[in-house]
Amino acid sequence: MQSNQEFALIIHNVHKHFRNVQALRGASFLVEKGTIHALLGPNGAGKTTLLRIIAGIIKPDYGQVIAFNMPPGSPELIGLMGYMTQNTVGYQNITAWKNVTLFAEIAGIDKQMINEKTEYLFSELEIMNLKSRKFKELSGGEKRTVNLIRTIIIGDKLLLLDEPTAGLDLERAAKVRKLIQKLSKEGRTILLSSHIVTDLENLSQYITILHSGKTIFTGTKEQAIDTFTTDEKRSLENALLNAFDNNPSQNNLNSAEETQEGQLHSEKTGKSI
Amino acid sequence: MSQLIALIKKDLHVTLSQRAVWFVLIGPGLFIAMLGLTPILFSNTVNVTIYIVNEDVGVNNINIGTNATILITNYFMNDKTVTIKTVNNISKTTLEENIVWFPKNFTEVALNTSVAIFYVRTTSSDTYTRQLLFALIPQLVDQAVKMTLLPKEQPRAQLEQLPVQTPTGIKVKDELEYERAYQASFSIGYAIFLLSIMLGSVGRIGGFTRDKNEDVLEIIVSMVKDKKVLLISKVITNLILTTITALSYVIGALIAVIGLKYSEIDTTTQGTNDGLSTLVFSQELLLSPKGLVIVATLFITTSLIVVISLLIQLWLPKETGERAESLIILVIAFFFFFSVISDPFTTTFILLINPLYWPYKICMTALFPDIFSPWTYLYGVLIIAFYVVSAIIASKLIMREQFILH
C-alpha cells in the first residue's frame, strides 16, 4: 500500500454535469509524483473537463480531487501547477515573451526567476528569434510552444498538458517531448492528454483511459497492451483503439462508484489508497 | 496584493498595446479641443472689410443711419478680423465686396412707416462673412432703430431668448443664472454622452470580453487565489483607462477654453460658430474651482459605465455579451442625452432610472445651488447603492462556471 504522500494527484469518483450532459460519471485514478501520466479517451470522454477540475477552474458535482494534499483552487497550489489548454491561447497584440512573463507574474513567481526560466526555455526550444514577435504573428505551432513554456514556468511541480504536441512540426514535437522527459526526470509530475501515439509511447509511464466520463483503465502502458490487445496485434495503438471501442459497462474494472468510501481500488494496477 | 498588481499590470499592458485603444482614450479630448477651437480656426482665416455707406440725412436731428453706423463700428472695434470703413456715397463702393447701405430717406421712412429698408451686399461666399452681414448687422441696425426711436426709460428688447417654460420644482432667482445653467447642462450632458459611448468600447477591450475572445480566461482563473481578485483587477484597470479618457476630455476642453480666451475671439457673437463651441464647458466653469466638480462628475460617470459594462460581460456569454454591451450603453447614453438637452431641469421617470442622470444632476446642483434643490444630492445615495448592489451581483456572477466556459 502506497501512502497519499507519494501521489501528486488523487482523483476519486469524480462526477460533473453541464446542463443535460453528464461529462464525468465516476472518474478515478492516481498520479504518482514525478511520473508522466497520460489521460486518454475518445472525444467527449471528459478529459478536458477533468483537467479543468484539477486546475481549479470548475468544481466537481461529486467526488474528490486532491493535488499535493490540497483541493484544487487552493492558493498554495498557485505557482506549483500549470495548465495548458487544448486551444492555443494568448494575447494577440503583445509579444511572445510578454505572453509568458506577464502570466508568470500573476502566479507570484519572482521576476528574475521568470526572466531566467523564460530565457532558458526559449533557447531550449529554439524560439529565441520569436521573443519580440507579436503573438498574432506566430504560427500555430509556435504559439503552442509559447503556451507550453508559460505552463512550465507556472507549474513548478505539476503540469496539466492538454495536447501539448498537437500542431507542432516533427522537429519541434521531438524537442518538446525531450523537454517533458527532462522535466519529469527533475521531479515534475506531468498529466497529459494526447491523441498522438508517439507521445504516449515515448513519454507516458502510466495511462488512464476515460470513456463516457468513467475510468475504464488505469495502469502502465504494458498493462494496457495486455488488457486490450491479443497476442497477434500487441501495440499501444491497437490497445487504445480497442479500449475506445469498448463499452465501459463490459469492462471488468471496478468503477469508483462501486468502491468503498476512501478506498479507491483498481484490480489492474493494484494501487490503492 | 501582489497578484492584484500583476493582474492590473497585465491588463494595462495588453490593453495599451492596441492602437485602437489610444484613439478611444484620447480621441474624446482631441475631438472636444478641435470642436471648441473651431471659431478660432474659422475666424483666423477670414479678414473681413465692411463698407458702411451712410447717406441718411435724418429728420429733425434724428439720424438712425448715423447711430447704426456708430453702433456697428463700436461693436467691431476690438475685433481684429473685422474692419469697418465708412463712406458717404454708394458710388465710392462699386468695386467693394461687402457693403451696408443706409439710403437718404432711411430715418424718414422709419419714422413714417413700420418698415425702414437698408441694403446689404456681399460677393463673398464665406459663411462667416455672410453670417455677419445677413444675421449680425441687421440685429445691430434693429437695435439702433429701437435705441433711437424708443423713449430711454423703456426697456430695450432682449435679443437673447430665454427658455419659455419654467419647470416645476425649480427655483428661479436669477434669469442669467438660469441661462448659464441651461448652457452648462448642454456641455455637461454632451460630455457624459460622448464619454459613455467611447467608454463602452474601452470596457470591452480592457474587460472580460477580451480575455474570453483570446481564450486566456481559463488560464487566468486557474492562477488566481480568489476570483474576486480578478474582478477587482478589472474594475481598477478599467477605472484607470476611463480616467485617462475623462481627463483627456477635460484637458481637450481646457485647451479649447484657454485657446478661445487668449484668441480674443468673441464667442458670444451671434451667427458665428458658437453653436459648436457651446458643447465645450464655459470659461467661468472650467477655469474656476467649479471645474473640479465637472472633473469629479466625469469620473463618477465613467466609473458607472465601467460597472455597467463589467456586469454585462459577467452576465452574458461572449457571443451575445459583446453586442448587448454596446447596445445597452448606447441606449442609456442616448436616452440620457436627448432627455437632458430637450429639458435639462425636469426629471422624468425614465431619467430617474438612468444611472448617467444621477451624477449629472448632482453636478448641476453643485454648480447652480440657487436653481436646484439641495434634495438633489440624494442622487448620491442612488449612486452608492448602485455600486454596492453591483458589487454583490458581480461577485456572484463571477463564481458561475458559465462565466468562464462561455
Image (cartoon, coloured by chain):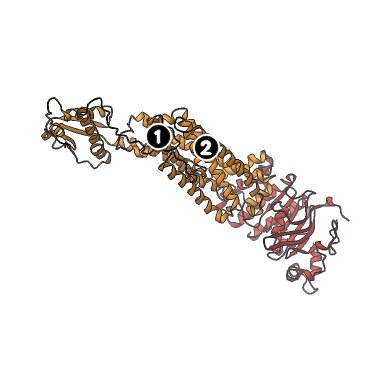
Chain colours: A red, B orange
Mark yes or no: residue A145 visible.
no
Q: Is residue A248 left or right of residue B254?
A: right
Subunit bearing disc 2: B
Q: Quadrant of residue A87?
A: bottom right
The image position of residue B73, as x and y in percent, is: 22, 28
The image position of residue B141, as x and y in percent, is: 21, 33
> Residue A78 versus residue B370: which sits nearer the camera?
B370
Q: Residue furthest right?
A: A1
Image quadrant containing the C terminus of chain B: bottom right
Mark yes or no: residue B42 visible.
yes
Q: Is residue B329 left or right of residue A190?
A: left
Report the disc number at residue A166.
Answer: none
Amino acid at pointer 2: Phe
Label 2 – label 1 distance at C-alpha: 20 Å
Q: Which residue is mark 1?
A: B256
> Residue B25 versus residue B58: which sits nearer the camera?
B58
Q: Secondary structure at mark 1?
A: helix
Q: Which residue is mark 2?
A: B299
Q: Residue at x 68, y 55 (%)?
A: A176
Q: Residue at x 40, y 43 (%)?
A: B342
Amino acid at pointer 1: Ala
> Residue A87 versus residue B268: which sits nearer the camera?
B268
